[in-house]
Amino acid sequence: MKNPKKQVLKAVQKLGNSVTVADVVARSGCSLQESTFLLNEIAAETSATLQVSGDGHILYCFQPNFQYKYFSRGTAKVLSILRRTFGPVLFFLFKISFGLTLMLSVIIVFGMILILRSLLSVGADSGESVQGMWSDFFLALRRIVWLDFRRLREGRAQARLGGEAATQSEVPSGQGFLLDCYYFLFGPGDPNEGIEEYRLQLIAQSIRLNEGVVLAEHLVPYTGRPPDDEQTLFSILAKFNGSPFVSESGNILYSFPSMAAHSDVASYAFTAALVQEQEWQFTGLSRQALQPVILLAVANLLGACLFYSIIAMIGGRHTADLRLFEFFSIYGVLFLAIPAVRWFVVRKKNKKIRESNQIASEYEEKIGKPDLELAKKLEEAEQLRRNESVQQSKQIVYRTDQDYLEQMSDADYAKKLPELN
């Protein structure tokens, strides 16, 4: 049996990349419902656009060689699956390596400083002070290593228990040096994890409340995208098996026949009016927790660069010690450069989030207080609902827990009596 999606792709290609649903049905042999669904899905995946012809037909317009873009997206999906499967483990190990390497670098750099301090103290009456420095150094290392790994295990155990206080966007205070390094480098994570599923849930409820006929403006409070963003609309059409519809005045409405049946679910009446994304946090750490991490990273970088310069002048440029401190210097630069770059990325993301939230808020208010143009479109949508007989009767005409004859009315029984005899 042939793949229906491939048939639709071939049909679009042979029809010249500008097609109607009826053209695709006639060319591919697929059903009307299947062709509409697949055409919306392909349009969303290949950045197609909609056009309305002079006689009121809707044309799906695809770019030249759109099929190559479609197949490249398929490859990207496979890579995305691999990334979701193996990426979290590899990325976690990569992130932890920065904190561990910084700790190792600190041990070697400050250990070298103490060794030099001890050598310079030979012959001088300062043995007790040097011994005290070494004692303080090892106590500090013991506190950093033991306390951090203990708190790391406690944090992971709380996360497994499902405690809400251990969420990604809420960083606990006093968690120790290693975890502070982790959040300094990579932040507390995505505060909007799972928001796409929430968007789709609210969009589906909005379509149901509007009895299967909506305007693009109905969806903006949930998508945060302007009503002329066709790719977002195509994705929604493909997801909920909808299709565009041209009104008599030339406005485009969106019909979802499978979502049109009346529902008595009371919770739909309490559907959220809009979706507001949360802004990303840079670290989620307090200034008190962040300050020691930055100071130690800067001190470690300066110390590594200092010993690199000393060894380069004394022992040449091809010694193992020189390569070691070269590695620590590069790590020290990355330890400060990654948060610096991420700071700009977070600012850019938050700017987009604010813009998206603003668009959602504006259209949520606009739907509640429509202008003349929007009011006319809303009236046309209501007219389409009536013409399409979208509203279904609430009367239950058949149920499985009673016998068929028991459910027949007197009038029905009178009509069926000749047949039963």
Image (tube, rainbow, N blue to C red):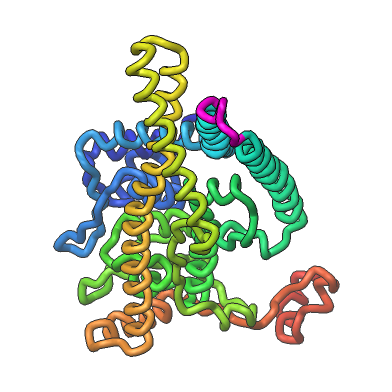
Examine the rendered structure and indicate whether residue 323 appears above or below residue 180: above
Give how far across and how far down residue 258 sits, in percent. 52, 64
Taking depth in this image into account, of 387 and 124 the one nearest to the observer is: 124
Give how far across and how far down residue 387 sits, in percent. 39, 78
* Image position of 8 (left or right of 250): right
- Would residue 85 be visible to someone looking at this image? no
Q: Which residues are magenta?
A: 119-126
**Image quarter (top left, top right, bottom left or bottom right) of the C terminus:** bottom right
Give how far across and how far down residue 154 sits, in percent. 75, 51
Give how far across and how far down residue 127 sits, in percent. 63, 34
Residue at figure coordinates x 48%, y 32% from the top left: 78
- Would residue 327 be visible to someone looking at this image? yes
Taking depth in this image into account, of 175 and 346 the one nearest to the observer is: 175
Residue at figure coordinates x 42%, y 78% from the top left: 385
Residue at figure coordinates x 54%, y 78% from the top left: 271
* Image position of 175 (left or right of 407): left
- Find out whether residue 113 is within the magenta segment: no
- Find out whether residue 121 is within the magenta segment: yes
Residue at figure coordinates x 64%, y 59% from the top left: 174
Q: Which residue of the protein is positioned furthest toward the left in this rendering? A: 54
